[in-house]
């Protein structure tokens, strides 16, 4: 019984301390002197922490030699690239014993860096003359909480965990809504899931694949759209 209570407290603490996503900016990576593809995100959380996250579709060649990831506002990638004024995020090359040639990874950015401080991401191969490995341009902020109802109605809805690791997201309503249309949309605005719920104070939505989605909740009192993410 004691062990079960401890587990319950740890479980509750996990949700109490969990971060909520506030704003997101996305960049699609493009080839430079090497093949590069995938999406990266600047993700701002409600505790003011800011992450740079490479999505699962990030892919480059097998051997990554001394490739540094920078954030910058300068898109002049003439070799050798001048890194003055750039923010060094991480060295992802094999020279440091690492090899992030593909897949997801997340880096915490220094305190004080804002989500709008940099407009570009560039990967530079430092060992071979600061070559232009590849780059991407961040779009404008994607709001994570858009509501067409009142502010009170929007705050009466809790969605967690967000981001989700296993794809399960719980929706909690403060009141028992009589009739709610639940729609899950992808980044292209396509409805990938839809269900109408009645007299439910708690509801679970499954995000089948990693990525960013919009969860739309429509009732007689208005419409609330929240951004949800599966890592």
Image (tube, rainbow, N blue to C red):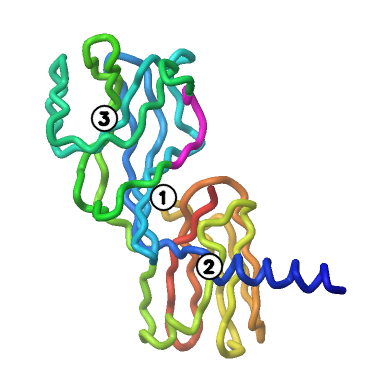
Residue drawn at the location 50% of the way across and 36% of the way down: 104
Q: Are marks 2 and 1 in contact (CB under 8 Å)?
A: no
* Earlier-in-chain disc, 2 versus 3: 2
Which residue, as the protein is rendered here, is positioned at the far front? Answer: 2
Q: Is 164 located above or below residue 28 in the figure?
A: below
Would you say the magenta stretch is mainly helix, strand or loop? Answer: loop
| Residue 9 occupies quadrant | bottom right
The stretch of residues the image draws in magenta is 100-106
Image position, residue 226 (x, y; %):
44, 67
Please name whichever residue, 110 or 120, is drawn nearer the observer in this view of the structure: 110
Q: Dot 2 corresponds to which residue?
A: 17
- The N terminus sits in image quarter: bottom right
Answer above or below: position of 169 versus 166.
Answer: below
Looking at the image, tell me whether mark 1 or mark 3 is earlier in sequence order.
Answer: 3
Residue 122 is labelled as: 3
Residue 73 falls left or right of residue 152: left
Residue where numbered disc 1 is placed: 188
Q: Secondary structure at mark 1?
A: loop
In this rendering, the answer to whether 164 lies above or below 128 is below
Please give left or right for residue 64 compared with residue 82 in the image: right
Percent x, y for residue 78? 13, 18
Between circles 2 and 3, the one closer to the viewer is 2
Q: In the image, what residue occupies the spot 40% across and 20% down?
A: 93
């Amino acid at each position: 019984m004691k062990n079960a209570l401890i587990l319950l407290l740890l479980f509750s603490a996990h949700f109490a301390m969990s971060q909520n996503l506030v704003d997101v900016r996305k960049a699609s990576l493009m080839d430079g002197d090497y093949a590069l593809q995938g999406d990266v995100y600047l993700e701002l959380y409600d505790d003011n922490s800011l992450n740079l996250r490479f999505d699962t579709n990030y892919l480059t060649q097998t051997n990554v030699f001394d490739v540094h990831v920078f954030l910058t506002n300068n898109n002049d990638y003439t070799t050798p690239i001048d890194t003055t004024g750039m923010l060094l995020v991480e060295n992802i090359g094999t020279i440091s014993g690492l090899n992030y040639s593909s897949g997801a990874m997340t880096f915490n950015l220094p305190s004080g860096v804002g989500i709008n401080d940099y407009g570009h991401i560039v990967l530079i191969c430092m060992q071979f003359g600061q070559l232009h490995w590849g780059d991407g341009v961040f779009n404008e902020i994607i709001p994570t909480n858009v509501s067409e109802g009142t502010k009170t109605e929007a705050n009466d809805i809790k969605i967690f965990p967000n981001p989700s690791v296993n794809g399960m997201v719980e929706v909690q309503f403060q009141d028992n809504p009589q009739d709610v249309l639940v729609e899950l949309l992808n980044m292209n605005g396509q409805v990938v899931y839809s269900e109408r719920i009645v007299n439910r104070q708690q509801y679970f939505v499954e995000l089948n694949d990693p990525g960013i989605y919009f969860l739309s909740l429509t009732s007689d009192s208005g419409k609330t759209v929240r951004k949800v993410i599966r890592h």
